Amino acid sequence: MKILRLAIAGLLLAPLTHFQAAAQVLDPTFASPTSIFAPAAVFTMGDQQADGKRLLSGTFTRVNGTASGRLVRLDAAGAVDVPFGQNVGLGSNVFRIKNLPNGQYLLGANGGSITVGTTSRVELLRLNANGTPDNGFDPGPGPDFTNDYGYVQNYDVQADGKVVVVGYFNTYSGATAAGVVRLNADGSVDTGFSAGSGILSTSNQYASAYTVAVQPNGKILVGGDFETFNGTPAPGIVRLNANGSIDATFAPLLLAGSQVEGLTLQPDGKVLVNGYLVNTATPGSGPGLVRLLTTGAIDNTFAVSSSQFPVGSISTTFSDAAVRLQADGKIVVAGYFSTGPANGLARLTSTGALDNSFQFNGNPNSNPSSISLDATGGVVVGNYFNTLRNQENNLLRLTSTGASDPTFAAKLQIPGNVVAMVRQADGKLVVGGNFTEMNGQPVHRLARLATNGTLETSYSAATGVLPAAVTCLALQPDGKVVAGMVQGVSRLGTTGAPDLGFAAPALATSNLTAVAVQPDGRILVAGGLNGVGGAGLARLTSTGATDFSFSRAVSSTGTGSPNGTDALLVQADGKIVVGGRFRPTGQPSAVVRVVRYETTGALDPTFNNLSTFTATNGTTAPSNRVYALAQQPDGKLLVGGNFDAVDGTLHYGVARLDAAGMADASFAPNALLTGNVFALAQQPNGRVLLGGSFTNSSATTGQINLGRMLANGQTDASFGNTAVPNTTVRSLLVQPDGAIVLAGTFTTVNFQPALGVARITAPNVLAVAAPAAVAGRTAAWPVPAHGLLHVRPDASAHPRSIELLDALGRPVLALPVGTAAELTLNIERLPAGVYLLRVAYENGSVTRRIAVQ
């Protein structure tokens, strides 16, 4: 029989106990990205001016390739008005823009303050036509609500310059104002206007006015979520006289429960009303848009299809106007609807019928955040996230037929981020996140970096446009990449091209948080799921179809299925570990647990599935989460997240469970970790790397966002503050040579530029190999192996575990070391190929390539 002594694979590194540790540093041979940008959101747009210009606000910090504030004015072609931007400066968030007749703008914050230059105003700020603040308008401290937080929802301006403001408040700048107030042209409260008790309601303490429209005759329409106004029944809408009293001649026929979100005045005095409208005996059966006559009666000549535009479907992300009236009487509407060619945006005739001459074909999973009419007869559409018509820009101009207008070129961007990362067998990195430009090159939320960090443009060109930001990644043994996104899941081939043999159902109503590939090729997906095999967790076949054989029984403890999953792990034995929120029967809220399932989806009875991860006092706080899971070679589970205790025992942010799911008392952190642990990785020497947004209060070495623990949970003092990411680390991996690769939202590491992805090294610290004598006393046979692989570790070196890794470095077999002098791995079911055998000892590891026939 041929017996091979195992040699140490790769770079020989002496045990940490023998040499002074060198500090970890950025790897100068790895080129981190120099720029990463993503599409920015659009919050609101003002009307187009006579000169073709339009004011808009959003999250952007870069417009058309140049740094910009979050309030910008574009001309008719999409070019930036530079002098205006210089006057406005960086500014702050603006969620409402009202064009004034004199060329000024009235800006709204929707809960907060607005700053332009050196001028700050609460909720409302008036801006001059050149972008400078109008210091003649000061609304004072603004809205307040007794024992609560008051805010402005909307406003409109009268012909005399006075401003009618509505929202959630019972006082405004110290004056009594129950949801409606009028300000003078200088911003002071108009004492000549009084709405009495307004929208206050004993049955609905959160009653609020959402929208307001001042009619040409001076009367004021107010809509929102209220049942009465000043003690008079007014389900969702009321008209006031100029002094604030109720106009009794206006009697709308909406029923109780109606919530009016938008009011659009027509030149003939009729009013378009959108929202959750109850105008039949069966709540929820009516359309999302009706037209009222001047008396308030419903205009029966205007008939919107309730099947195409159901109640509540005509709405925008930030409650900006979802209805725009064209000069020819046609009506543009935006919302959560999908009716033929009208996905999120449609045009109606003046009678309410769908105008099929306008076809948008937008993203059915997203609706516009803002729409604005254009002088060309088209529509400018602003979006908050995802893509608009397969274009990675959240601002488009459409022609009068709904086609994209290529003559309008405005590119709004924010800094991008990397949140997920996998390493291919050849050492290249596939990274995912929210980015569509890297190093000045177009990418599509997925990119591949060469081993030295350079961007492979051919991979990005092949992926095509993805519908949303990538949130998680998994690598298949054949090199294909499974990408989980804000909405849905895709699989890409080794070149980056979409895998046409994979077709997943519409999966997510919120972010997919994790994906994992099982040994049999089936794919686990976790996050906010939409009826595809279970809330929080589902399984797909290798072709992407829902695998209904993966089912979990209902459990009174809530462990049958997670309400929401944040972490997912497939163990070496195929069992599935989930970190998430579970709601036991009768409990008002969910608890955070780590639960293990068999490959069938059945609960694993050998695992302690009732562990709880809580705050210090034992209660589950809203911020408590389990974000990261990792399995040690000995079968124990590392758990990272935001928690202070496990089953009542203090474990700040990191804990270890034994193979049966019980908290491991031998893993005892000695420092207070505050924040979130998003990523875990174990080094060959048994030490544990942590990535996230946290601080570690260790007396020996305070670690920020990136840290390391010894195998017993104590802070590793040798891992000092010489490679500190300035912000969050979302993903970690350890290369075979011991170097650490990290990805996240950071822009520097130890004050050196390193954008989104970085690699750090540290001789004698990052990887530790066992001494050569230990390798010489470690044996494995037969070679090549088939059926069974025998291993004889060096007992004198205190072996801890034995594992067999595939070509991607993933454990396929793991075996804890007991007292037996010789151990056997059953490799009958493994595909033929080359594997890596790793024996972990107390002071390092011994590795060797093993051929399996």
Image (spheres, rainbow, N blue to C red):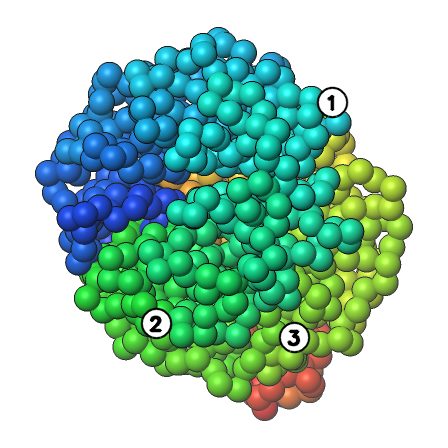
Q: Which element is circle 1 on?
A: loop
SS label for mark 3: strand
Give the amino acid type for the residue marked by disc 3 in the picture: Leu
In the rendered image, residue 629, in percent from the top left (x then y), is placed at: 61, 53
Q: Indicate the quadrant containing the C terminus: top left, top right, bottom left or bottom right.
A: bottom right
Q: Could you tell me if residue 324 is visible in this image?
A: yes
The amino acid pointed to by label 2 is: Thr
Q: Is residue 175 left or right of residue 721?
A: right
Q: Report the number of numbered marks.
A: 3
Q: Determine the image quadrant of residue 182.
A: top left
The residue under label 2 is 401
Residue underneath mark 3: 540
Residue at figure coordinates x 82%, y 61% from the top left = 603
| Residue at x-position 39% and y-position 35% | 216
Toward the left, the furthest residue is 83
The residue at 27%/34% (across/down) is 100
Towards the viewer: 541 or 587: 587
Say whether disc 3 or disc 1 marks the residue closer to the N-terminus. 1
Residue 106, horizontal then vertical, whole percent? 31, 31
- Gap in Å between the C-alphas at discs 3 and 1? 50 Å
Please say whether residue 640 is visible from this viewpoint. no
Pointer 1 residue: 202
Q: Secondary structure at mark 2?
A: loop
Apparent side of residue 579 relative to residue 417 in the rendered image (left or right)? right
